[in-house]
Image: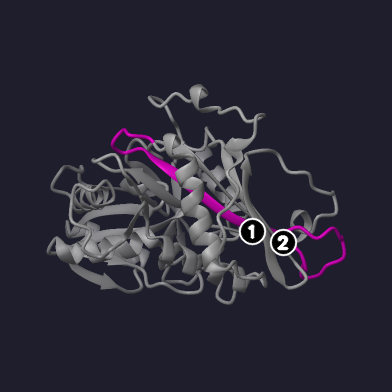
Amino acid sequence: MNELIDPENSNAFKSRLSLVDFNNLGFGTYVSDHMLVANYSKGKWHNAEIVPYANLTLAPSTLALHYGQTVFEGLKAFRMEDGRISIFRIEKHYQRFCRSLKRMAMPEVPFDIFNIGLQQLVKIDKDWVPSKNGDSLYIRPFVFASEERFGVKVSEEYKFIIFTGPVGAYYSKPLRVKVEDVFMRAAKGGTGSAKCGGNYGGAFFPTQQAQKNGFDQILWTDGTPQLNIEESGTMNAMFVIDQTVVTPSISETILDGITRDSLLNLAKDLGYKVSIRPLSVFEIIEAHKKNLLHEAFGVGTAAVTSPISCIHIQGKDFFLPEYDRNSFCTKAHKLLSDIRYGKAEDKYCWNTILS
């Protein structure tokens, strides 16, 4: 793949970096100066270039606006201790991106456009990568159906975009979550394992109802009488039961989380047993009664780990022990962060370090 255009050669370009409050980033507040854009038509991707971040012009009949052909990814870049920039697990994110695209009948983006384009974009906007420990540059690749036609059909035209933005912590305190036993996030044969827009839009209403009742998030279940845990809000769910890290198996209804996969590797390094299997809400209740439920937390790219302080199950609150530096999610979070920031050995070769 040829070098992408560096738009900073344009006399009209003016950076917005001075508008950023790096001491109060929030999450999703700021967008960096540039974006990568490529188009798909006549069976191939073409015209990949990096341009100044700007609004899009879309026809009201654009297919994605009507029938939901839209898929996204989320990964992060980090300012390492020595000042260099690392991007975490590019290939693993790309593989999941392609699986999501396939499920939504959309064309795969070639790896060289995704990988080289992403790295060049981060290099161009390198000054947007925060230096504060815990902060990062969030990277959002996505594809949507761009064909202008309102008949129900698989689009023949698509647009691929990557933009970035500096972010801080996603959740600042342990969460109070409600086990959802009425609404379902996903069903077998559906799109639960794909990062497509409809999965998130469909989750908004029950999450909104839970938040009105004082909860931060939902623990999704599979709709069976066993009420097997699936995900925690927009994250994978993990539990520490009797010194064993337990998490549901990946399936067609559960997203194959990259943070989840990373923490399962680190759990073994930290000396924990790992159990990947169905986990019923009723097993959680029994473990709590026996004082064997030590931790529950969500894991994902945005939050990394989000400890859960209370699980609300069918009208009753189950409180968990307080988290401290000896908690698994605290230790795993720190070790993963140290690897990303270059403070610990990257023995799994997860980091792509920009030169």
Q: Are marks 1 and 2 in contact (CB under 8 Å)?
A: yes
In percent of width and height, residue 241 lies at 21, 62
Please say whether residue 214 is visible from this viewpoint: no
Between residue 87 and residue 125, name the one nearer to us: 125
**Residue sitting at 34 percent across and 61 percent down?**
260
Image coordinates of residue 69 in percent, x first then y, are: 69, 62
Q: Which residue is mark 1?
A: 143
Residue placed at 49% from the left, 60% from the top?
115
- Residue 238 is situated, as x and y percent measured from the top left of the image, at 31, 59
Which is nearer the eye, 143 or 26? 143
Tag 1: amino acid: Val
In this figure, which residue is indicated by the disc labeled 2? 158
Give the quadrant of the N terminus. bottom right
Badge 2 crowding class, 10 Å Cα cut-off, few under 14, some 14 to 19, many 20 or more, is many
Residue type, label 2: Tyr
In magenta, the rendered stretch is 130-159
